[in-house]
Image (tube, rainbow, N blue to C red):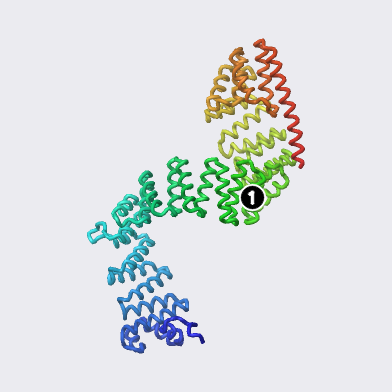
């Protein structure tokens, strides 16, 4: 047999060879020192301790921690000063969940060996795990309770302070290190100062660390995160760019840089950052997902689709990658393929509201609003009471011409929870059914509860203007809407129209011309009304040429809208 086959100490090899009966007898001896002296082959106490230690090792090998702990305790009777026995016994007690007994064993050993710093730190960690922070702290304080002078104790106290959330004390203990302050200590000092809201001081500490060791990725990340939290995005970006120059293969820094650039809407920069990450780790599906999202924001649909497909190949059941791919396919008007992906997402997660919403859009494109409404009914059975799905169902019913169904859905939504958006949609549906006075009641409630709801303010003001009712109040509501959104062409049109109805055509012309300028070339048939209004005002002001020009643009918009509608229907069939 090779002499290297069994490298265990000789005492353990002898223990393994002991017959089971002898081991059982020795276990009994652990409880009886007198009997143990008869069993031990040598009367010397040191040999007896080694003998019981060997038996404890055998018990550990046999998966008997309770017996192991008992034998180690017996060995300590013969060698009470042994650190090896104390540590092994404490470790065995901890594996049994008897941490307080383990702490008592280590505390006794520390009284015998007060200069053993490793033992002191181990006991402090155990006290900390037990939630006894006062005892942990007392291990490092001076006898009178004052702060210690030695660096090891100061560092231990600072670590306890940080865990307890006493950041001021942590900073005090770390500063007390003086010339012994190491980069690791300075990093913790920066963290303690940052947690106190002293970002300028914390930043200075982080920069001192990086001046000594610029390859500390975690410090660059902390520095950038602090600058971002302070609202200094350019500084946060500069931090990370410096970090990746110092550590060009750091996935942590490239990832943080990519996310920062994406949040800052620098999608090309985010694309490059995530591209570097993808080069470092081509198999990371989430990196491909984020790069694809950046490319999607750049409107680079084909590269984005390639990234999402690659992410799906790596993680075939990742719903985020599947939804992103489906969205790209929708934007590319590949509706059938997008629908297949979204149904796969819903098989994995039937409660995904976003997937239901996107699939309803796809079904609407492929099969019409009735099919979309039917699908949303299924969605609400999967996610009962979801506000967004209920509003979408109401919109689908409206598009399908089922106004009564729309009203029923909106009333149900409002019965679950008050919602200004749902109430506004209910008002619009009632108006569409010819129940303006009921609609008016709902709109007045919306603007009372949400006084800056520009859409509701404009809707009610324009409705009064169209009906020739309460014109001064209508003007006031529309001007409130414009105060919220001063460049909205529809609100400008409403203002021009109510001024026209009030007989103030000279004042009406300017907002109507502004609205027309913003909507020129539109393909939305509803926008033609703005030019109809402008034509009416120009006619009343005596400018027949301007009126003809406005009517021509209204006609052109309606023509473009019809052609666009035919193209959409054709694309939907594909």
Q: Measuring 75% from the left and 26% from the top, which residue is drawn there? A: 559
Against 243, residue 541 (above or below) is: above
Label 1 Cα neighbours within 10 Å, binned few <14 / some 14-19 / many ≥20: many
Q: Measuring 66% from the left and 49% from the top, which residue is drawn there? A: 306
The number of numbered discs placed on residues in the rendered structure image is 1
Against 474, residue 560 (above or below) is: below
Among all residues in the image, which is located at the extreme top? Answer: 542
Identify the residue under disc 1: 308
Front residue of 399 and 538: 538
- Looking at the rendered structure, the secondary structure element under dot 1 is helix
Q: Position of residue 9 (x, y in %)?
A: 42, 82
Q: Position of residue 205 (x, y in %)?
A: 36, 49
Q: Measuring 73% from the left and 28% from the top, which residue is drawn there? A: 560
Front residue of 233 and 465: 233
Left or right of 391 on screen, residue 140: left
Q: Quadrant of residue 64?
A: bottom left
Q: Position of residue 82 (x, y in %)?
A: 32, 76
Figure quadrant of the C terminus:
top right
Left or right of 233 on screen, residue 481: right
Among all residues in the image, which is located at the extreme left? Answer: 144
Front residue of 239 and 432: 239
Q: Position of residue 214 (x, y in %)?
A: 43, 53
Q: Quadrant of residue 556?
A: top right
Q: Quadrant of residue 266?
A: top right
């Amino acid at each position: 047999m090779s002499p290297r086959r069994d490298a265990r100490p000789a005492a353990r090899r002898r223990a393994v060879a002991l017959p089971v009966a002898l081991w059982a007898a020795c276990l009994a001896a652990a409880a009886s020192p007198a009997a143990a002296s008869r069993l031990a082959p040598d009367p010397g106490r040191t040999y007896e301790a080694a003998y019981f230690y060997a038996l404890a090792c055998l018990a550990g090998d046999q998966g008997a921690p309770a017996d192991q702990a008992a034998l180690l305790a017996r060995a300590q009777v013969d060698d009470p000063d042994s650190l090896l026995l104390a540590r092994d016994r404490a470790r065995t007690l901890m594996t049994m969940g008897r941490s307080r007994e383990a702490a008592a064993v280590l505390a006794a050993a520390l009284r015998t060996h007060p200069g053993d710093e490793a033992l002191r730190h181990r006991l402090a960690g155990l006290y900390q795990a037990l939630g006894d922070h006062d005892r942990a702290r007392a291990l490092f304080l001076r006898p009178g309770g004052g702060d210690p002078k030695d660096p090891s104790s100061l560092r231990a106290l600072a670590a306890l302070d940080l865990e307890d959330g006493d950041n001021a004390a942590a900073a005090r203990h770390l500063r007390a290190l003086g010339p012994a302050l190491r980069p690791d200590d300075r990093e913790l000092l920066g963290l303690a100062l940052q947690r106190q809201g002293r970002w300028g001081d914390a930043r200075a500490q982080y920069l001192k660390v990086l001046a000594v060791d610029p390859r500390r990725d975690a410090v660059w990340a902390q520095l950038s995160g602090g600058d971002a939290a302070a609202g200094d995005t350019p500084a946060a970006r500069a931090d990370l760019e410096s970090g990746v120059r110092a550590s060009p293969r750091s996935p942590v820094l490239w990832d943080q840089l990519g996310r920062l650039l994406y949040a800052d809407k620098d999608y090309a920069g985010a694309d490059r950052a995530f591209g570097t990450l993808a080069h470092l780790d081509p198999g990371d599906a989430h990196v491909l997902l984020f790069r694809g999202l950046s490319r999607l924001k750049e409107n680079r649909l084909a590269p984005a689709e390639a990234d999402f497909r690659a992410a799906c190949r790596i993680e075939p059941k990742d719903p985020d990658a599947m939804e992103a791919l489906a969205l790209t396919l929708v934007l590319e008007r590949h509706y059938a393929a997008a629908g297949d992906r979204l149904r796969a997402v819903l098989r994995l997660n039937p409660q995904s509201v976003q997937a239901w919403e996107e699939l309803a859009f796809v079904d609407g494109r492929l099969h019409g609003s009735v099919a979309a409404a039917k699908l949303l009914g299924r969605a609400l059975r999967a996610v009962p009471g979801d506000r967004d799905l209920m509003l979408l169902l109401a919109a689908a019913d409206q598009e399908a011409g089922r106004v009564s169904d729309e009203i029923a859905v909106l009333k149900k939504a409002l019965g679950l929870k008050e919602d200004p958006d749902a109430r506004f949609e209910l008002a619009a549906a009632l108006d569409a059914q010819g129940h303006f006075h009921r609609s008016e009641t709902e709109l007045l409630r919306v603007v009372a509860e949400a006084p800056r709801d520009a859409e509701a303010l404009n809707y009610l003001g324009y409705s009064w203007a169209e009906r020739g009712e309460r014109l001064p109040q209508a003007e006031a509501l529309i001007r409130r809407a414009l105060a919220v959104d001063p460049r909205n062409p529809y609100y400008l049109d409403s203002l021009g129209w109510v001024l026209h109805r009030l007989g103030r055509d000279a004042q009406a012309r300017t907002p109507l011309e502004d609205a027309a300028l913003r909507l020129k070339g539109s393909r939305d048939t509803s926008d033609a009304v703005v030019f109809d209004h402008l034509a009416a005002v120009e006619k009343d002001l005596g400018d027949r040429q301007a009126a003809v020009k406005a009517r021509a643009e209204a006609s052109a918009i309606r023509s473009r809208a019809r052609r666009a509608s035919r193209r959409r229907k054709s694309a939907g069939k594909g």
